[in-house]
Amino acid sequence: MAIMCEEAKAIKNLPRMLEQVPGIGVVQIGEGNLSQDLGYPREYDHPTVASAINEILAMCKEYNVPCGHPHVNPKNVEALVALGYRWLMMQPELSFAVVKMGRKAAGSE
């Protein structure tokens, strides 16, 4: 089962959900809605938004639940894998180049 974390209230409740809800296989960060809820629509690099995203990723690591990133492309795939994202949503491409880059960065190619 996958859950979306896309508002400040969800971040606050995430530890409890990860402790009490069996079967959560991935926490997908809903960056667009999260940034909107925090008052900085689509400003993913804004310190408030970036901090919230990092908080979600840290909680996922703490509970050993894969954290999903929704905006993966050739420019950020290696950095996202290095940060610890374990579920990556690639943008539509006409090739599998991003998938190959992600697999290589994760050590599975």
Image: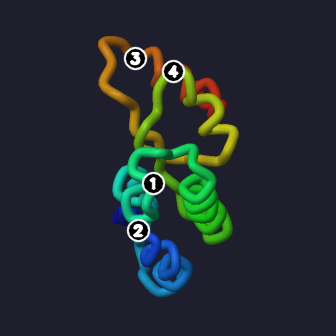
Above or below residue 93? Residue 24 is: below
Q: Quickly name the residue at label 2.
A: 7
Residue 89 is tagged as none
Mark nearest the camera among 4 and 2 is 2
Q: Does residue 2 appear left or right of residue 72 in this picture?
A: left
Q: Amino acid at mark 2?
A: Glu
Dot 2: what SS? loop
Q: Residue 83: horizontal and vertical position, in percent? A: 67, 44
Residue 63 appears anywhere in the view: yes
Q: Which mark is residue 74?
A: 4
**Separation (CA) of disc 3 from disc 1:** 32 Å
Which one is earlier in the sequence, the residue at label 3 or at label 2?
2
User: What residue is rendered at 30% in x and 12% in y?
Assistant: 94
Who comes first in sequence, dot 3 or dot 1? 1
- Report x, y in % for residue 25: 44, 63
- Is 87 in front, or is 51? 51
Image marks 1 and 4: residues in contact by CB distance under 8 Å: no
Q: Could you say which quadrant of the image residue 52 lies in?
A: bottom right
Element marked by disc 4:
loop
Classify 10 Å Cα crowding around label 4: few (below 14), some (14-19), many (20 and above).
some
Disc 1 from disc 4: Cα separation: 25 Å
Q: Residue furthest front?
A: 39
Query: Alpha-carbon neighbours of circle 3 within 10 Å: few (<14), some, or many (≥20)?
Result: few
Which residue position holds label 1?
40
On screen, 105 above or below 49?
Answer: above
- What amino acid is found at the position of numbered circle 1 in the picture? Tyr
Q: Which residue is mark 3?
A: 96
Query: Which mark is first along the chain, 4 or 3?
Result: 4
Q: State which mark lies toward you, 3 or 2.
A: 2
Image quadrant in which the C terminus is located: top right
